Image (tube, rainbow, N blue to C red):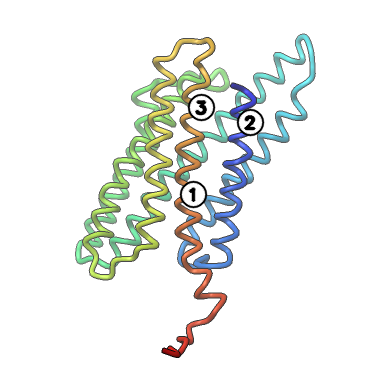
Amino acid sequence: MRYLLEVFAIVNATVLLVAFVFLLRGPARKFWIVLIYIASELSANIGLAAADFFLSGSVGESAAINRARYSHLYWTSNLFLDLLRFLLVILLIGRAASETSARRAMNRFLIIVVAAALILPFVLFHPRFTPWPRGAWFNSTSELLNFGAALMNLPLWATLIGSRLRDPQFLKVSAGLGVAVTGAALAYGLRHFIPPGGFRSVPDLFLMLSQLAGWLLWCSAFRMSIPERTLGTTPVASTG
């Protein structure tokens, strides 16, 4: 299972890199928020791979210390990316709502949602900093953020569908993000119910598959703009 996870990690990173290239060649200004997220995700993947390479291979007490260091780095990186995905949904909602008459009310609501997302993990899960919280706190906080992002993606869809200028590319980007955060929320939730053992990697595999589906949707969305950028906007005359 470990080798399968490593293969999917490479595939996921490759597809996300393709989405990044498509975005740079296409609607980079339009989706600059997504561009920042993808760059952060790719940087985190590279950083974790480098940390795994340099911290592995030791034995004895050094091995235990390095495992703890990698665990802290892994959970901190994951939490940062989960928070970034949550904020990405919020920012996309704010952008979509800017074209509606309820823009001010929606902005106030989004500020409350962000404040709640930052406070609730410390209220609900009671972390103990010794000096780092346990992995269970990081897992529960990531689950909360992704579940919240999945719920907030519903009003984003409602706003986009109800808009007079319905943007199919924006809808695809929202769909890809919705698949990724919903899969992440379910994967983190499954970790609570699966005991240590051979099936412990099942949530990780589910997480990678859902992310792969989301990144593929992003590739499809960002590729939509490339032919227009490459061929120009001059219509081709019919010869028939």
Q: 10 Å neighbourhood of mark 3: few (<14), some, or many (≥20)?
A: some
Q: Circle 2 is placed at which residue position?
A: 6
Kindly identify the residue that appears in the image at 35 percent across and 44 percent down: 114
Q: Is residue 121 left or right of residue 3?
A: left
Q: Quadrant of the C terminus?
A: bottom left
Q: For the residue labelled by badge 3, is the local secondary structure a helix, a strand or a loop?
A: helix
Q: Amino acid at mark 1?
A: Leu
| Residue 93 point in image, percent of width and height | 33, 55
Vertical placement of 224 versus 18: above or below? below
Left or right, 75 with respect to 70, comes to left
Which residue is disc 3 drawn over?
A: 204
Q: Residue at x 69, y 34 (%)?
A: 49
Q: CA distance from mark 3 to mark 2?
A: 11 Å
Residue at x 56%, y 22% (from the top left corner): 132
Disc 1 to disc 2: CB gap under 8 Å: no
Q: Position of residue 186 (x, y in %)?
A: 38, 29
Specify the amino acid type for callout 2.
Answer: Glu
Q: Earlier in the sequence, mark 1 or mark 3?
A: 3
Among the two numbered marks 3 and 2 on one chain, the one whose residue lies closer to the N terminus: 2
User: Which mark, residue 216?
Assistant: 1
Q: Position of residue 28 (x, y in %)?
A: 52, 65
Can you say whether 138 is above or below 19 in the image?
Answer: above
